[in-house]
Image: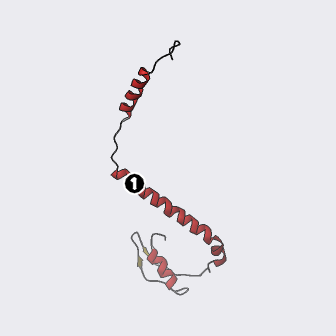
Amino acid sequence: LMDAPTVVGAAFGLALNQASGPLKSEQAIYFIKPTQRVVADTTGFAERLEALRNELLIGARQARVQFILQSLRANATVEDLRKELALQQRAQQDQMPQGPLGF
């Protein structure tokens, strides 16, 4: 039901054993009836809170870097000068004096 947040929200709004009316999502129509509630483990969450926070920060930083790189690539003007540089290097090597052994 991850693709149907309204259905999940309705489930939490119903009393135990109370049936819902038809709940429409983009992909289906649901009828729900909560039969039990499980209390969340807040101590487990508190123990993992710092790790979760770090994971979110890392993801946000990576997304920001990707956005910046995409923007730079989209706005960059690149001129390929490899051939010219190679020709200059060959010309410089040809001008260098060679010793009696040929190097």
32 or 70: nearer the viewer: 70
Q: On the image, numbered disc 1 is attached to which residue?
A: 70
Identify the residue at horizontal 48%, vertical 16% (top origin). 98
Image point (39%, 70%), residue name: 26
Q: Nearer the viewer, residue 80 or 22?
A: 80
Q: Position of residue 17 (x, y in %)?
A: 55, 85
Q: Is residue 81 above or below residue 23?
A: above
Q: Nearer the viewer, residue 21 or 68?
A: 68
Please tell me how crowded label 1 is: few (under 14), some (14-19), or many (20+) other residues with Cα within 10 Å.
few
| Observer-nearest of 33 and 81 | 81
Judge left or right: residue 82 versus residue 38. Answer: left
Is 22 positioned to the left or the right of 17 in the image?
A: left
Residue type beneath disc 1: Gln
Quadrant of res 36? bottom right
Above or below, comparing residue 72 to residue 78 in the picture: below
- What residue lies at 57% left-to-right and 69% top-to-bottom? 53
- Residue 16 x, y percent position in the rendering: 56, 86
Task: Please tell me whether mark 1 sits on a helix, a strand or a loop.
Answer: helix
The residue positioned 35% from the left and 52% from the top of the image is 74
